[in-house]
Image (cartoon, rainbow, N blue to C red):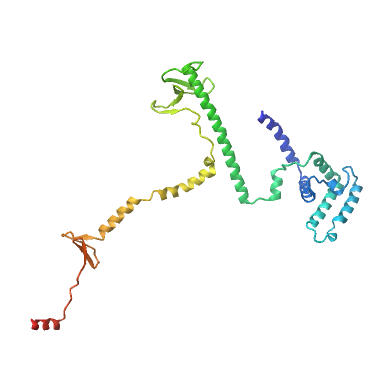
Amino acid sequence: MKLFTLALIAPIFIGGVLAWTKEDYEIFDIVSGLEAAEGKGTTFYSWLDVAPTASSADIGRAYRRKSLELHPDKNPGVKGIHDRFARLSVVSQILRNTESRERYDFFYKNGVPKWRGTGYYYSRYRPGLVSVSIFLVLLSSALQYLVQGMTYRKEVRQVRRLIAQARTIAWGPKQTPLEGPRKVRVPTGEGEGSRSVEVLVHGDDVFLLGSDESETVALDESVPVKPAVSRTWPVSLARAAIAPITSRLSSVPTAKITEDMEESDASTSKVNGNGVRKLPGSAASVAGGRRRKAVKPVKRKPKEEKEKAQEE
């Protein structure tokens, strides 16, 4: 029923939006600016202090009187006086033109529309590429979340129907619980040629049987996946982009590092036959579990050797 009503209203709404012209958009801007400056509910006629049935001559006299009141030379330093004076000129031109006055009178009687079409707002506010991109991302995410909700509700109804049909087939129309498990086939659709699945009814529990009967899935309302923001495409895309980085950080090859360190230690140390480990290029050696400094032999000169021999 709601879709039918929307289908009836949509052509009228779209037709009204497409029927708005450049002059209509100008009237919308003047009306918005006038209410913002002079107060909500201010109209062209009330601002000029004339009746809606005033003639063009009456509007001209009201304009001259109002222009003297709002002239910038008579209101030095008044904030926004130039905008108000320029707006007065545009209002006078609209009301003194027969066609544009008919357009304004239409909105004056029926009200200015609140939604004026995307073209109107785009031309007025000129959003940048970033703003448009953010809007499209949010809009598409909201639509995807809405589809998720619709799918979830549909699947919940289907699960409820399968449970009710399985119990009816297993227990009879009165659905009086019987002892012991009962395996039945339940059609997945409402038509005669719809596919059926095997279901096991055991007490209040209903299980969906797989190809291997040992594999069963409890059939309840927790089976359908609930809608979640985390499953919308922007979040899923962000997770897919971050996943390789987090997986590399979480799987640091600590075992490989340990092996490399042990191999490095083995390659930089040697063990002699006495079980003493010597480090090549080092001035120290290890013996008996204690370190001792290797003493370097002193080379004597020939003269010193001769004197030592004489002393002996």
Residue 99: percent from the left, percent from the top?
Answer: 84, 44
Quarter holding residue 268: bottom left
Image: 258 above or below 197: below
Q: Residue at x 51, y 27 (%)?
A: 159
Q: Residue at x 80, y 41 (%)?
A: 107
Image: 56 above or below 278: above
Q: Residue at x 48, y 47 (%)?
A: 241
Whether residue 188 is visible to the viewer of this picture, yes or no, is: no
Quarter holding residue 288: bottom left
Position of the C terminus by quadrant: bottom left
Tell me: 180 left or right of 297: right
Whether residue 106 is visible to the viewer of this picture, yes or no, is: yes
Residue 287: percent from the left, percent from the top?
Answer: 19, 62
Q: How many marks can you see? A: 0
Residue 233: percent from the left, percent from the top?
Answer: 54, 42
Tell me: 298 left or right of 161: left
Residue 145: percent from the left, percent from the top?
Answer: 57, 38
Position of the N terminus by quadrant: top right
Q: Nearer the viewer, residue 292 or 225?
A: 292
